[in-house]
Image (cartoon, rainbow, N blue to C red):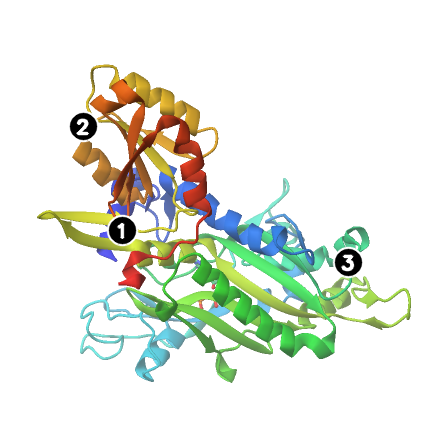
């Protein structure tokens, strides 16, 4: 994990927020390459949810909703973690995490503050308080007067916005169950578990889809979405061996869930949740109907049959997907006696697809390289770099996961051919400048499998 964290900072992917003030707990900023990678992850999600299907529509609902939302959804009452403080080391833990680790189920996020090899409670100095319920929602106020009536919450999940808009969406979208509403956006949770980089942050982007189905079809749709979502992560290039499905035990289920399975990834901290896929039953629509007085149901105009749809929810996190991609893609190898660090990202996810580099900074090479770059960037994300030795520039591109590099050298000036280097195989071919665009397009469209896995 330290290597990933260092690379992310060095190459402008992700770094601690508010760093000049000493940072702020569990909060990170995304730099240039982090933003590009994040956008690509989200684009792949939309592609799978919207572009490749016709039974899901998109939504972007507000972060701050009417406060009754969270009464109805049960979050005000039940969205709590059992917190334990250690009076000795001053760290705070989740009692459920300690119990899981103690029972041998493995919860990698818990460590004793003074002796990290031990669990909180096991070191002689440990002095733990009783567990107490701690609500994870961030509160704020709206309006000119600060009183109880003006208290609102930053959403802890994007899902509720979807339930609030169920009726409106049903009216305009001309869909009938089974159909889904998808959204990507920030959620906020007052998490107390420190460390582990972007695995657990106070604000994070979720990719959530609520799939509304006739009640008697809910189990088969749950199975369907478990499979679909596993396949999606595999298509992003993640190692199938480092992905697994884990059904929740009855004591683990959220207050709204009838059944949940997590897709877990083998992060450097151990197997941990990447995405949860829950059967939420009719809990949310029924609750919001009760609290709002609106009828939230589906009426079949032909048969007059009416029912409250049940819901399957695949809920993933952008940050956790990025962390999995970074861990999976990170590789070190020795090439001709030199150590090389390379991020083997799926080309479609790579922040930059092609780097255009003049071999040296003279004889007209930079000018021609720049011309090629300006031509290519209209169709693929490209970078031009003429700073430092060619070796250093390739090392930089390898570390940000750029799949292809174009070098303009002396021969280019004579015959207008360039070399095209492949990040994974290090193979270089020579081809005319005019064929570059087509060649890159062809390579981008090709299926990709990490050479780490092939090996
Ligand atoms: P955990 O058990 O790890 O706290 P959760 O079960 O509470 O997670 P869900 O409510 O199912 O998480 O949220 C769906 C997804 O949102 C998670 O699978 C994860 O990818 C992401 N997510 C949830 N909380 C966080 C967080 N604090 N930081 C980053 N991502 C998060």
The dot on residue 175 is: 3
Q: Which residue is mark 1?
A: 5
Marks 3 and 2: CB-CB under 8 Å?
Answer: no
Image location of residue 175, percent across then percent down:
77, 58
The dot on residue 388 is: 2
Name which of mark 3 and mark 1 comes first in the sequence. Answer: 1
Q: CA distance from mark 1 to mark 2?
A: 24 Å
On screen, residue 172 versus residue 128, left or right, reads: right
Please state which of the two labelled residues, at mark 3 or mark 1, is closer to the viewer: 3
Name which of mark 1 and mark 2 comes first in the sequence. Answer: 1
On screen, residue 386 versus residue 292, left or right, reads: left
Could you say which is closer to the camera, residue 373 or residue 342?
A: 373
Please state which of the two labelled residues, at mark 1 or mark 2, is closer to the viewer: 2
Q: CA distance from mark 3 to mark 1?
A: 44 Å
Please name the residue shown 33% across and 40% down the image: 404
On screen, residue 434 versus residue 222, left or right, reads: left
Could you say which is closer to the camera, residue 370 or residue 10?
A: 370
Mark 1 lies within 8 Å of ligand 1 (Cβ measured):
no
Question: In the image, is residue 155 above or below residue 251?
Answer: above
Category of crowding for the residue at label 1, using alpha-carbon neighbours closer than 10 angstroms: few (below 14), some (14–19), many (at least 20):
some
Name which of mark 3 and mark 2 comes first in the sequence. Answer: 3
Image location of residue 48, percent across then percent down:
57, 55
- Mark 2 residue element: loop
Could you say which is closer to the camera, residue 107 or residue 305?
A: 305
Could you say which is closer to the camera, residue 238 or residue 250?
A: 238
């Amino acid at each position: 994990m330290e290597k990933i964290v260092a690379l992310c900072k060095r190459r402008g992917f992700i770094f601690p927020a508010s760093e000049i003030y000493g940072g702020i707990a569990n909060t990170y900023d995304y730099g240039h390459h982090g933003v590009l990678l994040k956008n690509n992850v989200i684009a792949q999600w939309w592609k799978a949810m919207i572009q490749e299907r016709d039974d899901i529509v998109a939504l972007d609902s507000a972060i701050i909703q009417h406060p009754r939302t969270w009464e109805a959804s049960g979050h005000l009452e039940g969205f709590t973690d059992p917190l334990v403080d250690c009076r000795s080391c001053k760290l705070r833990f989740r009692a459920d995490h300690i119990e899981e680790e103690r029972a041998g189920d493995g919860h990698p996020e818990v460590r004793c503050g003074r002796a990290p090899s031990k669990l909180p409670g096991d070191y002689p100095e440990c002095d733990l308080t009783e567990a107490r319920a701690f609500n994870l929602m961030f509160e704020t106020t709206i309006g000119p007067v600060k009183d109880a009536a003006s208290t609102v919450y930053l959403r802890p999940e994007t899902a509720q916005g979807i339930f609030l808009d169920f009726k409106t969406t049903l009216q305009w979208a001309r869909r009938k169950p089974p159909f889904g509403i998808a959204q990507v956006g920030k959620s906020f949770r007052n998490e107390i578990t420190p460390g582990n980089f972007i695995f657990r942050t106070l604000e994070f982007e979720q990719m959530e889809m609520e799939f509304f189905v006739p009640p008697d079809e809910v189990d088969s749709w749950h199975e369907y979405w478990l499979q679909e979502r596993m396949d999606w992560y595999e298509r992003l290039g993640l190692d199938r061996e480092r992905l697994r499905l884990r059904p929740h035990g009855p004591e683990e289920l959220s207050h709204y869930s009838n059944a949940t399975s997590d897709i877990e990834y083998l992060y450097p901290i151990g197997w941990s949740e990447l995405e949860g896929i829950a059967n939420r039953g009719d809990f949310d629509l029924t609750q919001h109907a009760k609290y709002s007085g609106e009828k939230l149901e589906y009426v079949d105009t032909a048969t007059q049959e009416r029912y409250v749809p049940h819901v399957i929810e695949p809920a993933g996190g952008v940050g956790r997907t990025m962390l999995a991609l970074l861990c999976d893609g990170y590789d070190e190898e020795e090439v001709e006696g030199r150590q090389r660090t390379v991020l083997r990202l799926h080309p479609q996810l790579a922040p930059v697809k092609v780097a255009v580099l003049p071999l040296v900074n003279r004889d007209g090479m930079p000018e021609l390289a720049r011309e090629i770059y300006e031509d290519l960037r209209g169709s693929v994300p490209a970078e031009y770099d003429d700073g430092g030795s060619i070796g250093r520039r390739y090392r930089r591109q390898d570390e940000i996961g750029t799949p292809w590099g174009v070098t303009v050298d002396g021969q280019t000036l004579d015959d207008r051919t360039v070399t095209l280097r492949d990040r994974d195989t290090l193979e270089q071919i020579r081809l005319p400048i005019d064929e570059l665009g087509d060649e890159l397009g062809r390579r981008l469209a090709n299926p990709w499998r990490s050479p780490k896995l092939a090996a």
